[in-house]
Image (cartoon, grey):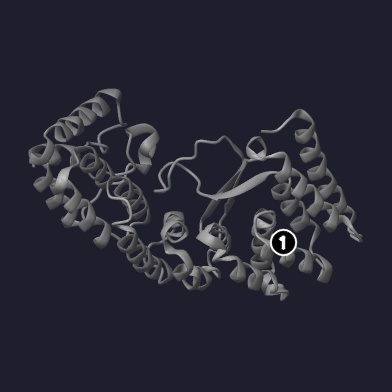
Amino acid sequence: RGVITSLVQLNLTNGPLTPEKLAAWQKNLQQLTNSGPAAVPGIREFLQSKEDMSFESVGGSAAVGQASIRMALIESLVKIGGPEAMLVLGETLRSTREPREIGYLARNLEQLAPGEYAEPAVESARAAMAEAQAGKLGRTDVAALFGIFQEYGGAGAVQDLMDAKGRWTYYSAIALGGLTEGAGVPALVQMAQDTNPSGRVTRSAALQMLAQLATDSPVARQALLDQAKAGPIHTAIWMKMSVLLGGEQLYLGGGPDTGLAPTQEPRVSSYHISGGNQNFYTTSTLDKLTSEQINQRVQLIDQLLAGNSDAGAVESLQRAKTTLSDRLKSGTR
């Protein structure tokens, strides 16, 4: 408890976070972790108190190594391991409504006890989403909640994601596209059919995800072709769809303090939408595509080009086709 008190009392009021202050704080955190199971009761007591101190003002995890004191203590529990630490981690997953904590806890508990905490993770994400919808989480980035629905929610999460699409349109679309066994595709098709002016963003996000899924999902492919035939699709949407058809893929997430697993792939593009504080990015999948998969994409692009009178759309689709063709010529796995 004394070590935890010293961690909480990191002095950020009397001047900047100096290397000396940071080194002392990290030494205390390591001392706590090295204490093993003996540290668990004190950590549990602090986590149950709901107290916290954010490090965002001094650079978050990039500067301190953690986004907050609670996240630091949760990571210590993960490192300590054992039944006592697991018990507290599970309790914290069920009680917290902080998106990044839910994301981090779910991911690490899944590694420690595969499948055992999937349902509690979804329940906590659902409760936190209700608080976010009610405005109780302010401008907090809730990407981790959508990551939980995507990873563990399955078909049961479709309604949660549809309920959230008004405020977090892109998060909802990306998560729907990532549900197992294509469970979210019918909902994406429904979103793509919204041709009302008020649904422009919804349609755009859904069409992009259908483009991303089209070569793996016959339903997504047919829906994309149907929408292209029905038209009109704005040139800007064609440009975004073409990038995905050409080998890029959309993922949830922004900075390192969101609770999502860090990406191992270099980012091609990053996006921020102020509405809902949504952050997402693309990576390239070209190096992972087989020649058959590339040919499938080229064939789909040819179908989308047929009869397309939008000059901007044609240019974007041709550019994607060239990218794929060049990759095919250079050799694939």
The kind of residue tagged 1 is: Arg
Q: What residue appears at the point 80 percent right and 65 percent down from the top-left corner?
A: 228
Residue 14: percent from left, percent from top? 25, 34
- Determine which residue is flagged by label 1: 221
Q: Is residue 61 above or below residue 228?
A: above
> Residue furthest toward the top?
20
Front residue (pair 270, 172): 172
Number of disc labels: 1
Residue 315: percent from left, percent from top? 86, 48
Q: Mark 1 Cα within 10 Å, few/some/many (few <14, many 20+)?
A: some
**Quadrant holding the N terminus:** top left
Q: Is residue 178 above or below residue 23?
A: below
**Quadrant holding the C terminus:** top right
Front residue (pair 1, 333): 333
Along the horizontal axis of the image, is 130 left or right of 51? right
> Residue furthest toward the bottom?
196
Residue 29: percent from left, percent from top? 20, 34
Front residue (pair 177, 203): 177
Along the horizontal axis of the image, is 294 left or right of 108? right
Q: What residue appears at the point 56 percent right and 66 percent down from the top-left corner?
A: 184
Residue 332: percent from left, percent from top? 70, 33
Front residue (pair 262, 150): 150
Secondary structure under tag 1 reads: helix
Q: What residue appears at the point 72 percent right and 67 percent down from the top-left corner?
A: 223
Along the horizontal axis of the image, is 205 left or right of 162? right
